[in-house]
Image: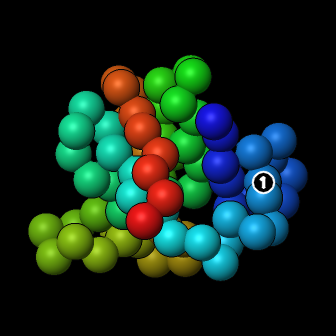
């Protein structure tokens, strides 16, 4: 399954925004997910600071992103 909050992504599902999911990569919970694809084994998400909040880019205008790879799972809670 693939889910995304980006409207231009093939995994975008407007209904998914109102549902609650738990996303994991290699058994660890991942927050601030942008796109997740279980079949391809990746999560595109925001990078977090030491306080667990999304990091800003050096210019402070955007949020930093990163890609996690491994065994990813989507679970509706």
**Side of 59 relative to 6 (left or right):** left
Instruction: List the residue tagged with mark 1.
Output: 12
Residue 64 appears anywhere in the view: no
* Along the line of sight, the residue nearer the viewer: 63 or 3: 3
Residue drawn 65% across the image and 78% down it = 18
Q: Quadrant of the C terminus?
A: bottom left
Image vertical order of residue 21 relative to residue 24, above or below: below
Residue 13 appears anywhere in the view: yes
* Along the line of sight, the residue nearer the viewer: 63 or 22: 22
Image spot of residue 1 (x, y percent): 63, 36
**Side of 41 relative to 50 (left or right):** right
User: Residue 10 falls in which quadrant of the image?
Assistant: top right
Residue drawn 27% across the image and 53% down it = 29
Spot the residue most to the left: 50
User: Residue 69 falls in which quadrant of the image?
Assistant: top left
Image vertical order of residue 14 relative to residue 13, above or below: below
**Side of 50 relative to 56 (left or right):** left
Mark 1 neighbour density, 10 Å: few (under 14) some (14–19) many (20 or more): some
Image spot of residue 6 (x, y percent): 74, 58
* Along the line of sight, the residue nearer the viewer: 12 or 66: 12
* Along the line of sight, the residue nearer the viewer: 7 or 54: 7
Residue drawn 78% across the image and 58% down it = 13
At mark 1, the secondary structure is: loop
Image spot of residue 21 (x, y percent): 47, 62
Numbered circles on residues, count: 1
Image spot of residue 37 (x, y percent): 58, 34
């Amino acid at each position: 399954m693939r889910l995304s909050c980006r409207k231009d992504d093939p995994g975008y599902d407007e209904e998914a925004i109102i549902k609650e999911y738990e996303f994991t990569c290699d058994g660890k919970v991942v927050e601030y997910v942008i796109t997740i694809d279980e079949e391809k084994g990746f999560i595109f998400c925001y990078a977090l600071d030491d306080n667990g909040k999304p990091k800003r880019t050096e210019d402070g205008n955007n949020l930093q992103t990163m890609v996690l790879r491994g065994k990813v799972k989507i679970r509706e809670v």
